[in-house]
Structure formats: C-alpha cells, structure tokens
Amino acid sequence: MSDRVEASGTVHWIGTGLSTGSGVALLCERAGQVTLWGRTALKAEACLDRLGLTGAAAAGAAEPATLAAAIGPGDVVVSMVPATEHAALLRLCLDRGAHFACSSYTSPELERAGQQARGKGLVALTEAGLDPGIDHVLAHALVARAGKAIGDTPARAWFTSYCGGVPAVADEFRYRFSWAPRGVLSALCSPATYLESGVEHTVQRPWEATRAYQLNGETFEVYPNRDSRPFVRQYTLPAGWVPQTFVRGTLRLDGWHAAWQPVFDVLRTGDDERIDALAADLLARYPMGEGDRDRVVLAVELTVEAGDGTRCGGRYLLDLVGDERQTAMARAVSVPLAFGVTGILDGTSPAGLHRALPDPSAAEPFIEALRGQGLDCRLTT
C-alpha cells in the first residue's frame, strides 16, 4: 500500500442543497481553503450568504472541466450531489490524488473505488452524515458499553435504529419534502430485510411492515429500510450474542401510513411514469417551505441479556428542530460529515474506505463533539 497522501488543507464542498449546513462553517475554521461548488456560481454564492459565510469560502460553478482543473493532490472533495454521481467524483479524486467524503450509503461501485483509494494512499469516507452516519456512531457506542458489562458470553440482543426527517408541526399529509420526492418513493419500493424474534424477514413493500413506536410518550410510526443484516457485522456485535431483533428503519409521524394510502396505491402499480408524475405533484403540494420548520428524530437502542439473566441496555435519542438559519436536516448531515473531513485534514483517518468512523472506539468522543455543535444525542439506560 502507498503511504497516505498528506492532506493539502484545501476542501471542495460540491453541492448547495438542503443538506448543506453549518458543517461548511466548521470546515472554514479548520481548513486552509474551502470552495463551495454549485450548479452555478450564483447558487454557490447564495448558499454561502444563507450560511453567513460570504467571504469565508470561495464560490464556483461545478462544470466538469473547471472542477477537474481545480482539484489538486491532497485536496478533500466532499460530495453532496445525488448518490448516483458519487462514483464519478471518487474516480476523479483517484485521478487527481485527492481524498473523498460523502454522507451516502456505500454502493458496490464506491466499494471497488475505495479499494483503489487505499492502494493510492487516499481516504474514501462514506456513510458520514445523519443516517447513515450518526446512527453508526451511536450503535458502536451502545455495543461497546454493553460489551463491557456482558462480554462475549452467550447472550441475546435486541437492536433497533430508526431515523426520520418530519415536519415540526404535523400537517394532514404527515410529511414535508426536504429532498427529492422521487428518492423517497424509490426507497419505499425497495425490499427490506431484518430480524424479528430471531427470524429473518423480507418485505417487498416496506410500508406494509409499518408499526407504532413510542418515544418519551409520543407515538410515531416506523418501518424497516434496506437490508439490516450486514450491520450486525459492521457494528461488531460479539460472536456470542445472538440477535433476536435487528432492524434499521425509517421513522414517520403518527398517522403517516393512513395519510399515504393514495401514494401506496400508485407505488403498487410499478408504473414509472405514474410514479414520476406523482413525485412532481407531491413536491408541488407538500414542499418544506421557508416558513416551515423541520424536525429530525433518531433513536438507536440496544438491549443485551446474558444467559444468567444479566441485562444491559440503552437508547440514544437525537430530537432536533430547525431554526431560521438552517434546517435540522442540514445541521444533522453536514456537521458529522465535517468532523469526518477534519479527520482527513489532520491525518488521523488512514487510507482506504471507511464508514462514519475509521476507529469505532472513537465513538464516545465523537458524540461529545456533536453535542458541542447542538446535536445532543441523549443516552437513557
């Protein structure tokens, strides 16, 4: 493996969407130079103005040739573009000798490119936002805490992780779109696999597995998302623990399932044209407007019971509402991503592909750092 390429101190943050928030300000404090790239330079300038960063960072138009010429060896490229565009940016980083970071799930293509990054001494950081991202950190902290109490003795484990961006004030639709509706609908059409009562379940339509979920006296609705099984290994559950429940899923306001019945009727048809038309209609009818406040709720919970009846458990809860300066989603995604980029800048992140944290033992300090930025992940036991 090549020696790790030293970070140059220059950061290229690509994307000015609703998940771009105060994490950019953190990087302006910690990097030598930050450039915010938008579809146009005007969009980038408007985003910097919204964040109060005019003059603190440069603005640019993310034209392919311009961007390629601007990225130098050791630079860090932060990809906040749609997930389908991450791989192309990572390949550009490999060509230019630059490090890469994003908040999205690790696709097979990113996985392959990440292996190449390791050979070139470059860091490829993925799953470093809210969900995925903060949820991974909280899971590692809970597993480590229970491991100290239970050890690797035979035990049963129950794990759930639910996250959602919802309106701070419920409307009749129980949702406001802060990102592309087509992505929301596509996720609902993707099968989900999880463990319940020690048995593996797969649902082709995740919303059909919706159930009530209680948090501090408030009722929400949750349903499974994607394939939860690989995270048993990713969260390093000891070999002696047998998962009884292991679910990673999405959280919605109470009443969401009933309000979305007309949406589900269209999704069942599988007609892409009808679903595209529905997405456009929903965006027009239920956008997250300037006067609206969003809310992010993330609950990660683990209970472990040893054969002798010893039990250990805890739940981390992040419950955050947006303000006039930025949305809760922008803060919750951009801040942990900025912390991850800081690890690249200061050389503590080794070369290769990493998800959220290169070292799971650093979970507790990471959680404390989040608290310092207004992301208070509260632990109850």
Image (spheres, rainbow, N blue to C red):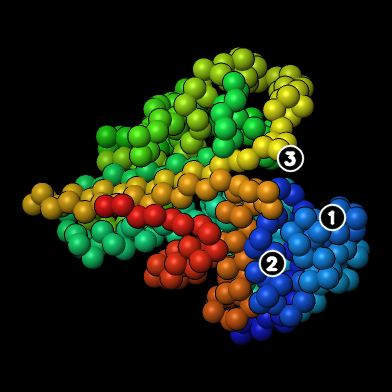
Q: Residue at (61%, 85%) from the top-left corner?
A: 3
Q: Which mark is residue 25?
A: 2
Mark 1: which secondary structure?
A: helix
Residue topped by disc 1: 46
Between the C-alphas of marks 2 and 3, the distance is 21 Å
In the rendered image, residue 352, in percent from the top left (x then y), is placed at 58, 71
> Between tags 1 and 3, which lies in front?
3
> Does residue 332 show up?
yes
Q: Residue at (58%, 68%) from the top-left corner?
A: 339
Residue topped by disc 3: 290
| Residue nearest the viewer, comparing 57 with 291 | 291
Three-letter residue code for mark 2 = Ala
Q: Is 196 left, or right, of 25 in this rendering?
A: left
Q: Is residue 284 above or below residue 116?
A: above
Between the C-alphas of marks 2 and 1, the distance is 15 Å
> Between tags 2 and 3, which lies in front?
3
To which quarter of the image does residue 72 belong? bottom right
Three-letter residue code for mark 3 = Glu
Mark 2: which secondary structure?
A: helix
Q: Residue at (77%, 27%) from the top-left corner?
A: 284
Between the C-alphas of marks 1 and 3, the distance is 15 Å
In the rendered image, residue 360, in percent from the top left (x then y), is placed at 42, 67
